[in-house]
Amino acid sequence: MTTAQPELYRGLMGVHIDTSSISSIKGDQGELVYRGYDINELANKATFEEVAYLLWNDDLPTQAQLDAFKAKLAPLFEIPAPVIEMLKSLPHDIHPMHALRTAVSMLGALDPKAEDVSIEGIQEDAYSMLAKFPTIVAAFSRIRQGLEPVAPDSSLSIAANFLYMRTGEKPTEAATNVMDVALVLHAEHGCNASTFTARSAASSLTDSYGAITAAVASLKGPLHGGANTAVMQALEGIGSVEAVEQYVLDTLGQKGGRVMGFGHRVYTVLDPRAVILRKVSKALSEESGEGKWFEMSLEMERVMDIEMEKKGRAVKPNVDFFSASVYRMLGFPADTYTPIFAVARISGWMAHLLEQYADNRIMRPRLVYEGEFGKTFTPIEERA
Ligand SMILES: CC(C)(COP(=O)(O)OP(=O)(O)OC[C@H]1O[C@@H](n2cnc3c(N)ncnc32)[C@H](O)[C@@H]1OP(=O)(O)O)[C@@H](O)C(=O)NCCC(=O)NCCS
């Protein structure tokens, strides 16, 4: 008698692991909704703080609720001195995501209430990590340049404070607005690899810092949040608009070749976040006079459209594609793009952990065993 082979869902494609009220993605319509609000409604209108509140609650805050939310965050921007010392002890040339991941893990070790996975306990962790992520990322960015970290200014918004802590100079309103839009667009995106990782880790009822440490590790990968860095490294390597076409053809000519910043598991049409970021990138390139990165990005999109159409595939730019040129024009080095993504995504990760801990079931999928059976044990001295 043969047993039916279980159906495989490699990469968990098409698998729904639970219900959620946080966000909806309609991949065939290019629609992204955070708790009922289309992303186009939120970007440019809502601040990142309003969106974080929205993700953790049922709706956007009233002014009084927003004031209370910000007041709760304000004293939490500071990171503990041992975390700063730890960041200083790291080699300066490491990927900054190693620094962020290690710092988050250390925050858990230093929090005497880390084991409290009640909803109230997770809410406290959420506020703390939302406030501390920008401080950690900015601090390591300075430390590796041989500079002292800049203490947070809790009177500033998260976007402005982040820019301020990197340079020690108060950012312009225009730069703050761009940062805010980028944070809103990267805040949440359903059951992506890092969010799934966070929920899966939390499903054992481990502490939230452990779950977020795992999520940071997942986000770092070039197929996920690491793609924005890879996009800029590719653009820097290509060097000119004229050389883009050959780069794309060469990349696609390699077995399994992937042009970074293109393609998505869920979207079959253009990612709505890419549509917004393309406009932001265009505006910045006109203002900054640094048009090259945007022009190269447009050329890459043009060539990919032609080549993918030949293959009968719809492989469009994703959120990481135009965010690369945007961050470049804001003055960030390429390897800091993924930590910036984390500064935004901590809001979505914590929304998911609040859902997961509130109604948990351990995640325990299976693998189809293809190995052997029936071997007998040979003592080590008799093995060939
Ligand atoms: C995002 C991504 C991981 C999704 O993976 P996936 O759903 O498993 O899809 P696949 O990688 O199997 O791609 C399916 C097909 O689309 C094409 N494709 C997808 N993304 C592509 C890309 N970036 N460049 C070139 N071709 C691509 C390929 O033709 C592939 O078919 P093939 O394996 O027969 O050549 C993938 O598109 C990718 O690697 N993109 C680049 C990294 C990136 O930008 N990640 C950020 C995502 S927000």
Image (cartoon, rainbow, N blue to C red):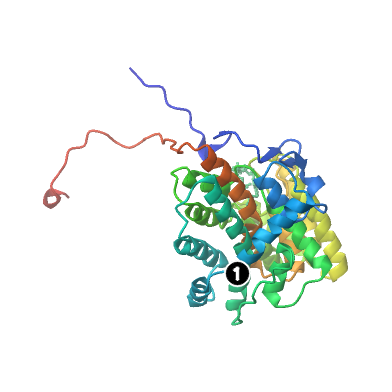
Query: Which residue is more in the foreground, 213 or 51?
Result: 51
Secondary structure found at label 1: loop
Asked if 238 appears above or below 367 in the picture, the reply is: below
Q: Position of residue 167 (x, y in %)?
A: 70, 76
In the picture of the structure, the residue carrying the numbered disc 1 is: 78
Instruction: Name the residue: 43% across, 37% down.
Output: 364
Q: Quadrant of the N terminus?
A: top left
Say which of 151 and 42 sits in front: 151
The part of the image, by quadrant, that contains residue 372 is: top left
In this rendering, would 304 be left or right of 347? right
Q: Position of residue 252 (x, y in %)?
A: 65, 51
The three-letter code of the residue at mark 1 reads Glu
Q: Is residue 184 shown left or right of residue 93?
A: right
Judge whether 72 appears above or below 265 on screen: below
Left or right of 135? Residue 273 is: right
Q: Residues within 10 Å of mark 1 (few under 14, many from 20)?
A: some
Q: Position of residue 202 (x, y in %)?
A: 48, 46
Residue 246 visible here:
no
Q: Position of residue 368 (x, y in %)?
A: 40, 34
Q: Quadrant of residue 18?
A: top right
The residue at 14%/44% (across/down) is 378
Residue 360 in sight from this viewpoint: yes
As drawn, the residue found furthest toward the right would be 286
Which is more toward the observer, 241 or 275?
A: 275
| Mark 1 beta carbon near ligand 1 (under 8 Å) | no
Counting labels gives 1
